[in-house]
Amino acid sequence: MSWKQAVECFCRRELEPLAAEARRVAMSVFGDAVFLRGLIEYTNYCRVNCLYCGLRRSNVDINRYRLNREIILETVMKGFEFGLRTFVLQGGEDEGFPMAELAEICRGIGEITRGEAAITLSCGIRSRKEYRMLKEAGANRFLMRFETSDARLHRYLRGGLTLARRLGALEDLLAEGYQVGSGFMVGLPGERDETIIRNVELCAQLGVDMAGVGPFIPNPQTPLAHVPQEPLEKSLFATALVRIACPETHIPATTAAGTLAADGRERMIACGANVLMPNLTPENHKKDYLLYPGKVCLRETVLKGFDDLARRTGSVNRRISFDRADGIRAGVPYQVSK
Ligand code: SAH
Ligand code: SF4
C-alpha cells in the first residue's frame, strides 16, 4: 500500500485495510516479537507548564517526588533479574535533579548490568553539552515526543516553547549518536486530520528509532480539563500510519491507549505497534506520576503485570521478547533536513 493510499484510507476512516497492511509490515520486520522496555518514572518535578500535562509547574495538587540513586538502581536490578534489558528513566524537566547525578546513575546502571542493558532517558529539553555528558556516562537512547507538528498549536500547548526548539533538541540528540524516539499525541484540541498526517510524515523525516503515538487524555488538574476525549480509534489510525510510513521504527503500544480501553494496547499491536513498556516505578510513587488520570499501570505490578502483558500479547498472536532490540539503524548518525 502506498503512502497516498494509506492517507486515503485514513481520510475515509477505513481502519481494517490500514491495520492489515500495518500488521503485514510489522510482521515482515519484527516477526511476531513484542519487545519490553521497563519504565521508571524518576521525578515528577517539572519547570515546564504544558497545558495538557498533570506534572506541569502550576499544578499544586500533586505530591512531588524524586527517586534517589539507590532506589533507581535497586529498581533497575529487580527488572534486570526478571530479564528486562532496556530501562527508560522518565521525568519532568526537574531543575533540582542535577544532570551530573543522572550521569552517575547511568554509570551505576552500566556497572550493575555489566553493560548488557540499554539505558534510555526521557527528561525533556537539555543543552547539547548535557546530552553529551549523559551519553558519555552510558545512556544509549532518548525519548522526546515533538507532541504536535503544528507550530502554532505546539507553542500554545507548551507554555510558549516552540516546535523549532523541540526539533533542535532532537537534532542535537541525533547528532550526539543517541537512538532517538519521538512521536505525538492524538486528539489534542485544535488538531485536524492534516495535523495527524503531518505528524506521521515528521516521524519519517526525522528517521526516529522509536515513534510513540498516544491518545491525549484530558487531565482534570490542567487547563485542558474540559476538552472532549477523542475515541481510541484515532490513535489506532495514527499507529497504523506510522508503521506504514516508518516500517523499521519501534512503536510502543502506549499506556495511555490501555487507559482509554481495556484492550487498547492489544489493539495498538494489531495496528503495527511492537513494544510494551511495563511500569517499574515503586508502588508508593506511581500514583503521583499522573500525566493524565486513570493510568492503567496503577493497577499493575511488574510480575503480576507481566503475566497480564504476556496474555494480551498472545491474544493478538504475538510473543514477548526480552531482546534489548536496538534501533535498526542504531549508530548511523542522521542529519535532519530543515
Ligand atoms: N518531560 C518529558 C517526559 C515526560 S512527559 C517530556 O515532556 O518529554 C511524557 C509524555 O507524556 C509527553 O511526551 C506527552 O506526550 C505525554 N502526556 C503528557 N500529558 C498527557 C495527557 N494528558 N494525555 C496523554 N499523554 C500525555
Ligand atoms: Fe513537564 Fe513533560 Fe509534562 Fe511538559 S509533558 S509539563 S515537559 S513533564
Image: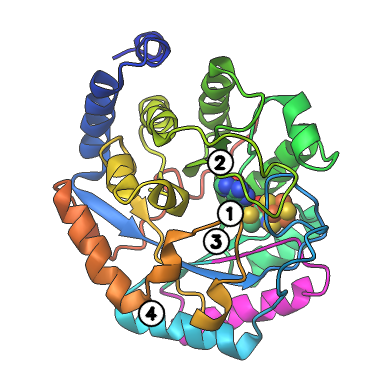
Q: Residue 90 lies in magenta, yes or no? A: yes
Please name the residue that numbered disc 3 is placed on: 140
Q: Which residues are magenta?
A: 89-116
Mark 1: secondary structure: loop
Residue 76 locus on image (x, y percent): 47, 80
Q: Is residue 319 visible?
A: no
Q: Quadrant of the C terminus?
A: top right
Q: Quadrant of the N terminus?
A: top left
Please name the residue that numbered disc 1 is placed on: 292
Q: Marks 4 and 1, how far apart in space?
A: 28 Å
In front: label 3 or label 4: 4
Q: Is mark 2 within 8 Å of ligand 1?
A: yes
Q: Is residue 279 left or right of residue 63?
A: left
Say above or below: 176 vs 151: below
Q: Marks 1 and 2, how far apart in space?
A: 8 Å
For the residue pair 198 and 309, the one nearer the viewer reads as 309
Residue 137 locus on image (x, y percent): 64, 72
Q: Residues within 10 Å of mark 4 (few under 14, many from 20)?
A: some
Identify the residue at horizontal 68%, vertical 67% (top origin): 134
- Where on the picture, by quarter, is residue 65? bottom right
Q: Residues within 10 Å of mark 3 (few under 14, many from 20)?
A: many
For the residue pair 212 and 327, the one nearer the viewer reads as 212
What residue occupies the far front of the structure in this picture? 226
Say above or below: 24 vs 192: below
Q: Is residue 36 left or right of residue 104?
A: left
Please name the residue that numbered disc 4 is placed on: 80
Q: Marks 3 and 4, how far apart in space?
A: 17 Å
Q: Residue 309 lies in magenta, yes or no? A: no
Please name the residue that numbered disc 2 is placed on: 216
Mark 3: secondary structure: loop
